[in-house]
Image (cartoon, grey):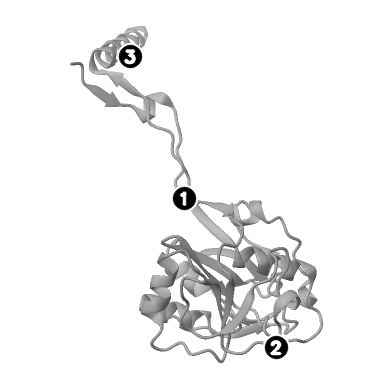
Amino acid sequence: MIKQLALPALAGLVFTLGGALEAAAQTRPDLMFCGSSTRTGTDLYSGIGTLNEVSGCTPDSNTQALLITRNGTIAGNGADWLAYLNNGGIIITEWNIPENVYNEIYGTSYTGESQGNCRDNVMPSVILNPSDPFWIANPLTPVDPADDSCGSDLQDVVSGEGGTVVALGGRDPENTVSLAYRTQGSGVLFLSGADWQDSDSGYTDSSRSLFGAMITARFTPVSVAPVPALPLGLLGLLGGILGLVGLRRLRRQ
């Protein structure tokens, strides 16, 4: 039997690994609020139908997404939240607590400070990484900087996690990161440093659409084409040809 040797370089193929966004319809009936929110229902999200809104900090198999607001209980929930993410759950944070939630789940020690205008929009005024699968699936319009939110700058988390946490949006002109995500198992943790739970005026349709997209987000692995393989005999012949070409060039010199 002739052995085969993979030759990705000779094939001239470039492969990319990562996550692709699957715009999945909701499959679980409940939207769980860990902490209070004066903005709920269609005042908060759109485009996904209606979910049962329940209170609690321990999501279960009926929880489509867990929304953690500023007065939600964070300490002691890390293990449950990690298990929920691994099993396809969605977690969305609020205002100045995303670092605390991230630390609780992953045992890190990030800190943050609040910045921006407090107009409550979860939709950022600057799109970061516009070619990310999330934005490709959800081509939404940024808000005006005057209508931006206030809350955490997530740049330290994005930089510290070395590509594991992906920045999606920021504030202008502060040059900060106000929205990022991390895929975990078959779930997604959205780190939102926006004060979206307030019921103040100024919440835009793009914020409602973005929130609906986050609630139903699903990332699936990108399928990678197999690397072509050549028989060792053909490889030897190819090597001989390349050697002759090189020898002729040397003689010409």
Q: Quarter-wise, where is residue 66 in the image?
A: bottom right
Amino acid carrying mark 1 in the image? Gly
Which residue is located at x 58 percent, y 74 percent? 30
Residue linked to disc 1: 18
The crowd level at tag 1 (other Cα within 10 Å; few <14, some 14-19, many 20+) is: few
Q: Residue at image x 49%, y 84%?
A: 57
Q: Which residue is mark 3?
A: 242
- Of 229 and 236, nearer the camera is 229
Residue type indicated by callout 2: Thr
**In 3D space, how far apart are the residues under numbered discs 3 and 1 (Cα atoms)?**
35 Å
Whether tag 2 and tag 1 are in contact, CB under 8 A, the answer is: no
Q: Quadrant of the N terminus?
A: top left
Q: CA distance from mark 2 to mark 3?
A: 71 Å
Q: Position of residue 25 (x, y in %)?
A: 61, 58
Q: Along the horizontal axis of the image, is 94 left or right of 43?
A: left
Q: Residue shown at 30%/8% (left/top)?
A: 244
Question: What label does residue 38 carry, if any?
Answer: 2
